[in-house]
Amino acid sequence: MAGHVVPHFHNSAGAPKILIAAREFMCVGALPPYDHPHVFLDMGSDDEIVCPYCSTLYKLDSHLHGTESNPPGALLEIPAAA
């Protein structure tokens, strides 16, 4: 798993759904300090999943790539360790 980074997404904007390109990711709720426990979510063979903490609906969008999201800006930028 070295070199593989799991993207973290947030829904600080309160969007009814967030379209993403990743099937496996972490939901953090809102931006800190208003985040919830960071939970790993795996869509498996489904195309959508609901976060059990914040009820954000995440849907897979094949037109997006990598860590893109719609609405844009839902990726939590984690600073690199020094």
Image (spheres, rainbow, N blue to C red):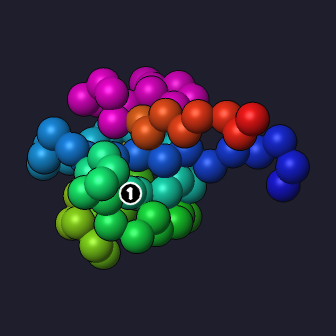
- Mark 1 Cα shell of 10 Å, populated few (<14), some (14-19), many (≥20): many
Q: Secondary structure at mark 1?
A: loop
Q: Compared with residue 74, is residue 5 higher up or lower down, i.e. above or below?
A: below
Residue 57 coordinates in the image, percent (x, y): 25, 56
* Of 54 and 22, the residue lying toward us: 54
> Which residue is located at x 42 percent, y 36 percent?
75
Say what amino acid the circle numbered 1 marks: Val
The magenta stretch is 63-74
Residue 61 coordinates in the image, percent (x, y): 39, 36
Residue 29 coordinates in the image, percent (x, y): 30, 57
> Which residue is located at x 40 percent, y 70 percent?
37
Residue 69 coordinates in the image, percent (x, y): 37, 31
Query: Which residue appears farthest toward the right when viewing the image?
Result: 2
Q: Which residue is mark 1?
A: 28
Q: Compared with residue 51, is residue 34 higher up or lower down, i.e. above or below?
A: above
Q: Quadrant of the C terminus?
A: top right
Q: Is residue 61 left or right of residue 17?
A: right
Location of residue 78 (image quadrant): top right
* Of 76 and 15, the residue lying toward us: 76
